[in-house]
Amino acid sequence: MSPFDDFLNKKNQYHFNRSWRIDAPIELIWNELINYKKWPAWCDGLERIEQLDQFDHLQKGNNIRSIWKGYLPYSISFDAVIKDFIQYSFLAFNVTGDLYGEGTCYFLSSHDNTTINFIWDVSPTKLWMKMSSPFARPVFIENHNHILEQAITGFARMIAQKSGSAILNNCANT
């Protein structure tokens, strides 16, 4: 890797750490989240999701491709490989494609509510995104936050329909 590539990669790292509490049992939350084929029904920013190996629900070793679009005039495509999976507790994955990095989701159950903590550490691989980052970084971050808010709001709405009582609470935003 050249020093210029190394410089661009370091300047283009994005770290997101978000938490939500949804007033619904962890079993319902978990089972709906691992059913990736249903994601397009509640996630407006998800243009397409593809199964890259044979499975029905997410589990360790699975590989899926997804294409995402926010309010900016481009889409992001990446493959995610599930690297760790602890039922009702933890999910970790690596991504490659238009983004490179990793994500983790922690789930914590307390009575009839579930807290989801999502950590996303990625950098873009498209040269135009790397080169425009010095002035476009805040716009990229806002676009990411827009997609994530649409997804979690849609997910909470779907859970509310299934449970009759889901309420979404943002716990943290960094």
Image (spheres, grey):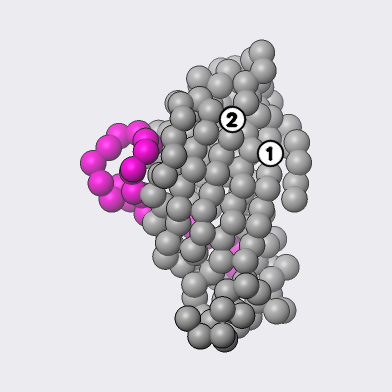
Q: In the image, which disc is placed on residue 98?
A: none
What stretch of residues is rendered in magenta? Answer: 49-72
41 lies above or below 164: below
For disc 2, the neighbor class at 10 Å (few under 14, some 14 to 19, many from 20) is many
Q: Is residue 161 magenta?
A: no
Q: Position of residue 58 (x, y in %)?
A: 38, 37
Q: In the image, which disc is placed on residue 19?
A: 1
Q: Earlier in the sequence, mark 1 or mark 2?
A: 1
Residue under the image location 51 percent in, 85 percent down: 2
- Name the one closer to the observer, 59 or 44: 59
Tell me if residue 99 can be seen.
yes
Q: Is residue 69 magenta?
A: yes
Which amino acid lies under the numbered mark 2 shown in the image of this protein? Phe
Residue under the image location 73 percent in, 32 percent down: 169
Left or right: residue 143 compared with residue 58: right
Which amino acid lies under the numbered mark 1 shown in the image of this protein? Ser
**Residue placed under numbered mark 2 in the picture:** 107
Left or right: residue 10 compared with residue 38: right
- Name the one closer to the observer, 96 or 3: 3
Q: CA distance from mark 1 to mark 2?
A: 10 Å
Residue under the image location 49 percent in, 43 percent down: 92
Q: Position of residue 81 (x, y in %)?
A: 39, 49
